[in-house]
Amino acid sequence: MKIAFCLHHFLPGYIGGTEIYILNLAKQLIKAHNDVVVIIPNPGIEITEEYYYEEIRIIKYAENSTEDRGMILGNTKPEGLGKFAEILVKENPSLVHFHELAPGRGPCRFHVEKVKELLIPIVITFHVPFYTCFKGTLIYKATEKCDGEIKIDKCTACIYHYKNITGFKATLLNTLATNLFKANINATFLNNPVGTAIGFPFVVNKIKNDLLYYAASAEKIIVIAEWYKQVLRLNKVPAEKIVFIQQGLSTGSFNKPATIDVSLPIRVVYIGRITPLKGLHLLIDAILQLPVEKICLSIYGLETEDDYVVSLKNKTRAIENITWHGRISPATVVPALSSYHLLCLPSAFEMSPLVIQEAFAAGIPVIASDVNGNAEQIKDGINGWLFSTNDSGNLKDKLSALVNNTSLIDSAKKQLPILNTFEEVGNAHQTLYGGILKDF
């Protein structure tokens, strides 16, 4: 069979978790004698281009749209939609698998509609929770976990908080916006900030409508985290449409873990994007409260000129037990992790972080925030530890306990789980595709 993967970016120009996932999945499907093509937009370019990356064929279709407000709100069709359709007609895939759908000039609802018109079966994987949350965090007003159910009033209030609109102003706007929504007066069509602010209920409602449209249009919706199934069910996605396929590691990641003695100083490592959502500031604050001679931290991540990155680097510049190592290539993550005692993942949100599995493959336990994506993989006190999300003090207490009793880390290393391979991920997709095509 021939599978077309559709998303916004691909390697080598863009390296992210979704791109690495698709790279590994495509390799497995090709190994099983399937034809795979990756289709992505060529933003700002009037021509369609092709290239290969690690034996995978990528088509970048001409997409010269100007990404204006209407397009970002999902109201305006991208100019490259016609080119996208032409490629599908020419390639004639057995199935189109969307891995990324978001308003803008990349794959979005309009692209799903076009595939439906061509009578090609559709599969969608939800790699991130933006399909049910405007912010993509499922944290209500930055303080408490959200169950993920889309509710117009609750979600609108949360967006105002996210936009730093609080107090009387937020109450006034929320009341006005809610009344306009009930009267079906959509202010988002006013091309100004006020129109956007009082139109947020319609933005939230569109998220809900798009989710239900995707569920109705796709043969199956794949989730990579089991906890997210419940979020979709709360939002009326039919249970029979949802398929859970667990994350996996490429076979090359299963190197024999290096064995290093757990002794002071405890060697803690952070690997990931350096953004407030990832919570590196919490980890740094916790480390700074612990004895320098008993714990050290190594940080791997792209060091941009963003204010957040610069502030953290300045804060740690003279701290001898905190070191920065820059970006790390995906192929070297597991070997690098093998030289540490402990991975820390202090994020405010995670869907199903691959780095936890990479740490387990490297033979080290993980201490992480207790958000759903982390808690699904970590058994607290057995193969790792969970601390209260956004609570640097609780993280410090957990690290202090490990510093004062390093045998706890040795015990956790003996309880690391058996990991899923990407060969199993590929087989699960192949079986799913085959069943869909048989019944389509």
Image (tube, grey):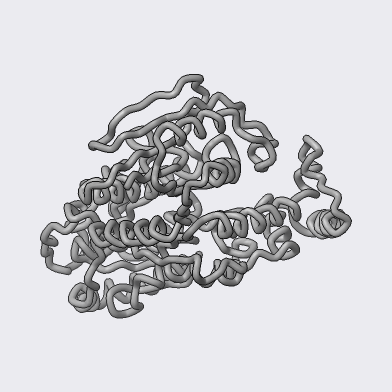
| Camera sees residue 346 | no
Report the side of 399 relative to 337 (left or right). right
The one nearer the camera, 148 or 427, is: 427
Report the side of 434 relative to 144 (left or right). left
| Camera sees residue 3 | yes
Seen in the picture, residue 377 relative to 137 is either above or below; the reply is below
Q: Residue at x 24, y 73 (%)?
A: 417
Q: Residue at x 81, y 38 (%)?
A: 190
Report the side of 392 relative to 146 (left or right). left
In the rendered image, the residue lying farthest to the top is 46
Q: Position of residue 309 (x, y in %)?
A: 45, 43
Q: Could you tell me how many numbered marks the image carries? A: 0
Q: Position of residue 57 (x, y in %)?
A: 31, 34
Seen in the picture, residue 107 relative to 322 is either above or below; the reply is above
Q: Which picture quadrant has residue 395?
A: bottom left
Q: Position of residue 382 (x, y in %)?
A: 29, 79
The one nearer the camera, 307 or 14, is: 14
Q: Position of residue 73 (x, y in %)?
A: 67, 42
Q: Residue at x 37, y 56 (%)?
A: 433
Report the side of 251 relative to 190 (left or right). left
The one nearer the camera, 289 or 350, is: 350
In the rendered image, the residue lying farthest to the front is 439
Q: Quadrant of the C terminus?
A: bottom left
Q: Residue at x 37, y 64 (%)?
A: 245
